[in-house]
Amino acid sequence: MIKVNLLKDQTARVRRNFAKPTVSRTGLILVAIFVLVAAGMGTWWFYLNRQIQNCTEKRNKLLIEEARLQSLQKEIEKYKKMKQLRLSRINVIEKLKEAQTGPVVLMNQVLQSIPQDGVLWLTSLNQKDSQVKIIGYAQHTEAIPDFMSNLATNGFFQTVDLESIESQKDAASKFSLLCITAKEQQAE
């Protein structure tokens, strides 16, 4: 039996030469440039993204600060209005105080002269022309000379004289003062 192989002879194998890739310098340079450009673009993108985040955070903080400052500005405006209102009230009070005459001025001078410790109180105040008679009580008789010196130093009275004093045991002492005003006040 004879076998015939119609296929090419397998005994002599021929090696096929495959084309070996050759690396050109221009190709390497282009690849290197591409890689550098891609790395640069990636770095630049990362840098810009970080800058955007930082600016967004800063903007949010500034918006919060702006809101706080606006609320403070409103509060300042409110206090300015309150200040203006109080200043106008003070001006009205000052004008009224300057326009005071007669008994009002007399009462102010006497009330400012009373000692603050509360050991002296007045029961009567009478004015006839330039004479003023003050009657009151004192828990301690030492408070009466203080009251008299306060009346004399305020400049409203020319003279302040003790008319009478009645001391009582375990009770307040009754006193009476006779004062002469420096200017003759009109009774209203």
Image (cartoon, rainbow, N blue to C red):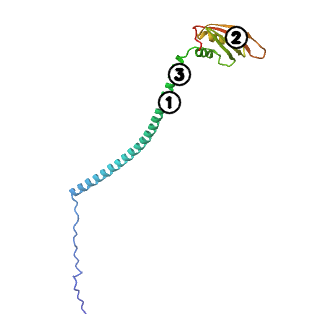
Please report whichever mark, 1 or 3, sits nearer to the chain's N-terminal start.
Answer: 1
User: Which secondary structure, mark 3?
Assistant: helix
User: Which-is-in-front pick, marks 1 and 3?
Assistant: 3
Residue 82 visible in rendering: yes
Q: Position of residue 108 (x, y in %)?
A: 60, 16
Label 3 sits on residue: 93
- For badge 3, the amino acid type reads Ile
Find out whether the residues at labels 1 and 2 contact each other: C-beta distance under 8 Å: no
Mark seen at residue 176: 2
Residue lying farthest to the front in this orientation? 188
Q: Is residue 26 above or below residue 119?
A: below
Q: Position of residue 72 (x, y in %)?
A: 46, 35
Seen in the image, is 90 located left or right of residue 120?
A: left
Q: Nearer the viewer, residue 130 or 72?
A: 130
Which quadrant holds residue 97?
top right
Q: Quadrant of the C terminus?
A: top right
Mark seen at residue 82: 1
Q: Real-space Cα distance between discs 1 and 3?
A: 16 Å
